[in-house]
């Protein structure tokens, strides 16, 4: 087993805490949870509503994956964190599901949380595997 590789992706979302965008070990890629911050201008407020925030989160995750030469087809596990679980679950799912090929959804855990950084409504992280 080799040492882990710590990745910060050029053009990726600004870190809101001390972390790497992704850490890779033996072909496994652990992508840090992303919020709805705009990678082009981190001072912009998050988009309103869980659907818009989910789209931005998924785009941020795609940026990180693409920076590693991977895509959504390499994702094997996702964790979703929602601050308004009961009201936002269905809307988040509609957006989330549209990012994956039919019948090729990663395993997933989705939980309600009391708060997220910068008052985000949704945060998602991934585990991916290199082919």
Image (cartoon, grey):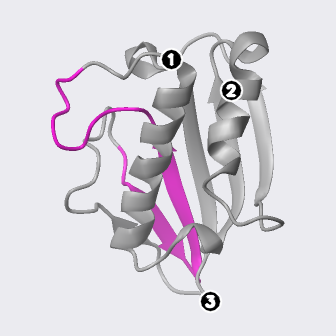
- Badge 3 local density, few (<14 within 10 Å), some, or many (20+)? few
On screen, residue 72 versus residue 60, left or right, reads right
Among the two numbered marks 3 and 1 on one chain, the one whose residue lies closer to the N terminus: 1
- Above or below, 15 relative to 119: below
Q: Tell me where residue 99 appears, x and y as whole percent.
A: 60, 55
Q: Position of residue 13 (x, y in %)?
A: 29, 45
Residue linked to disc 2: 91
Q: Which residue is mark 1?
A: 49
Residue 59 in the magenta stretch? The answer is no
Residue interval drawn in magenta: 19-44
Label placed on residue 131 = 3
| Picture coordinates of residue 117, whole percent (x, y) | 43, 20
State the image quarter where residue 111 is shown: top right
What secondary structure is marked by label 2? helix
> Where is 45 relative to 97, above or below?
above
* Front of the two marks 3 and 1: 1
């Amino acid at each position: 087993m080799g040492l882990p590789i710590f990745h910060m992706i050029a053009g990726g979302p600004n870190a809101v805490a001390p972390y790497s965008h992704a850490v890779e070990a033996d072909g496994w890629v652990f992508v840090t949870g992303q919020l709805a911050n705009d990678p082009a201008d981190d001072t912009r407020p998050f988009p309103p509503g869980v659907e818009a925030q989910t789209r931005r989160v998924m785009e941020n995750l795609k940026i990180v994956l693409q920076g590693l030469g991977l895509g959504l087809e390499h994702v094997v596990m996702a964790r979703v964190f929602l601050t308004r679980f009961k009201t936002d679950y269905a809307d988040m799912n509609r957006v989330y599901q549209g990012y994956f090929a039919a019948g090729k959804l990663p395993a997933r855990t989705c939980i309600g949380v009391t708060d997220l950084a910068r008052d985000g409504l949704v945060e998602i992280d991934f585990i991916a595997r290199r082919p």
